[in-house]
Amino acid sequence: MSRIHPTAIIEPGAQLDDTVEVGPYAIVGAHVKVGARTTIGSHSVIEGCTTIGEDNRVGHYASVGGRPQDMKYRDEPTRLVIGHRNTIREFTTIHTGTAQDMGVTTLGDDNWIMAYVHVGHDCQIGSNVILSSNAQMAGHVTIGDYAIVGGMSGVHQFVRIGAHSMLGGASALVQDMPPFVIAAGNKAEPHGINVEGLRRRGFSPDAISALRAAYRLLYKSSLSLEEAKVQIRELALAGGDGDVPVTTLLTFIEASQRGIIR
């Protein structure tokens, strides 16, 4: 308990590993569980039915596990689950889920959440995601692994952001953004494949070449979306390193409910 500052308030029922550090004037609610070696900065509030894994760093004045900003919420028992090794910087807000969805907001592992970010109710954030300062996720947003959302960007509710994609700063995203794609603008428009990011993550030249070919079919040809999907499906059967990522791209597009940026 020596790791908990004497001015911090830990409500009865909270479960903190003995190695957790809690800074001055922080508040940890009764239904919160915090894993080993996690640090909670001064004046932060961790509340609700919130589970935080190991080795996380929560910055000063963060608000984690608060009630969803949804006028339909009627105090149903919903949750927030955060994985391991996440960095959550100052003034970030992350809310629990709602009964209208799965009832849980989730963050995976190794995410980098910068200052003033908002993660709304029922968001599903993967792992190794970067949310830059002031990025705002409305409710029910899904973000795949290794995606990057630029600072000052806004993401509409129910929008999906695919893995390994990158949304530029000060963008407004109102439709699904396919994996591997770079987009920016208000409203966000596609600007190519995230080649440098894919190289850093070990994608082979053949895989990147196949994704570029799929991108050309989707965005640079005169094909309709349905016609492009037919040719992308054929490309996914070429028998090389690109088969898996191109199939991932196609699966994402076919599952879209809001439509993809185009």
Image (cartoon, rainbow, N blue to C red):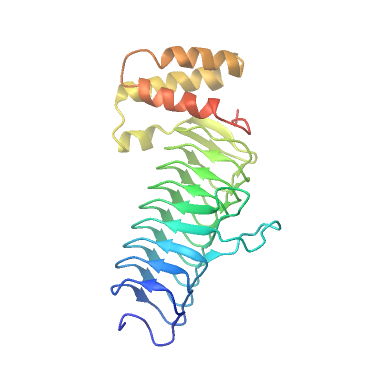
Figure check: 72 above or below 178: below
Figure check: 54 above or below 166: below
Figure check: 63 above or below 145: below
Figure check: 23 above or below 107: below
Who's the residue at 53% across and 27% down the image? 253
Which residue is more in the foreground, 223 or 79?
A: 79
Who's the residue at 38% across and 55% down the image? 83
Who's the residue at 59% across and 44% down the image? 171
Give the farthest residue toward the right.
Answer: 71
Q: Position of residue 84 (x, y in %)?
A: 34, 57
Q: Position of residue 28 (x, y in %)?
A: 46, 75
Which residue is more in the foreground, 69 or 103?
A: 103
Who's the residue at 48% across and 16% down the image? 232
Q: Position of residue 181 (x, y in %)?
A: 48, 32
Give the farthest residue toward the bottom.
Answer: 6
Q: In the visual, does 223 lie left or right of 4?
A: right
Q: Position of residue 47 (x, y in %)?
A: 51, 69
